[in-house]
Structures are given as C-alpha cells and as structure tokens.
Amino acid sequence: MENKTARLTVLIDPVKKQAFESLCTSQDLTPSQVVRQLIRDYLKTHGVSYGKQAANSEPNE
C-alpha cells in the first residue's frame, strides 16, 4: 500500500451511495478499498504508470 494518502471527494446520489456501501459491506470491503482498486485498474487499463513504477520507467516502455 502507498505510504502517503490524499483525499478524493466524489459526489454521487444517495441511492447509489447506499447501494455501493451495502455491496461493499456484503463483500467485507470498505468503500475506500473498492475505489482504490477501481482507480488502480483504470490506470492500468489506460497504460498510466504512477509512483515508484513511473519513476523507474523509461519513456517508451
């Protein structure tokens, strides 16, 4: 896990928020865990490097 954290505020409608939180709870996950995984997957899908991985990468890799 990353050493530093930053806050990301997302506005969604209350019905979707409740459904999302309920699903997370049923899977024994926190909403933050799920959102972090979604972000990692999205970055990977689009070929975006970050963190130590980005610092050690060559430009055309």
Image (cartoon, rainbow, N blue to C red):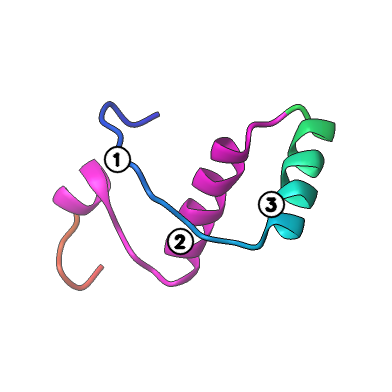
Q: According to the image, label 2 marks what residue?
A: 44
Type of the residue with mark 1: Ala
Spot occupied by residue 44 in the image (x, y as percentages of width and height): 45, 61
Of the 4 image quadrants, the one containing the N terminus is top left
Q: CA distance from mark 1 to mark 2?
A: 20 Å
Residue 13, placed above or below residue 51: below
Q: CA distance from mark 2 to mark 3?
A: 25 Å
For the stretch drawn in magenta, the main secondary structure is helix
Spot occupied by residue 32 in the image (x, y as percentages of width and height): 54, 38
Q: According to the image, label 1 marks what residue?
A: 6
- Determine whether, in the image, residue 27 is placed left or right of residue 42: right
Residue 51, placed above or below residue 46: above
Spot occupied by residue 57 in the image (x, y as percentages of width and height): 19, 56
Q: According to the image, label 3 marks what residue?
A: 17
**Could you say which is closer to the camera, residue 40 or residue 32?**
32
- Start-end of magenta stretch: 29-56
Type of the residue with mark 3: Lys
Type of the residue with mark 2: Lys
* Residue at x 33% of width, y 31% of height: 2
| N-terminal label among 1 and 2 | 1
Of the 4 image quadrants, the one containing the C terminus is bottom left
Check disc 1: other Cα within 10 Å, few if <14, some if 14-19, many if 20+.
Answer: few
**Could you say which is closer to the camera, residue 23 or residue 2?**
23
**Marks 3 and 1 in Cβ contact (< 8 Å):** no
- Determine whether, in the image, residue 34 is placed left or right of residue 44: right
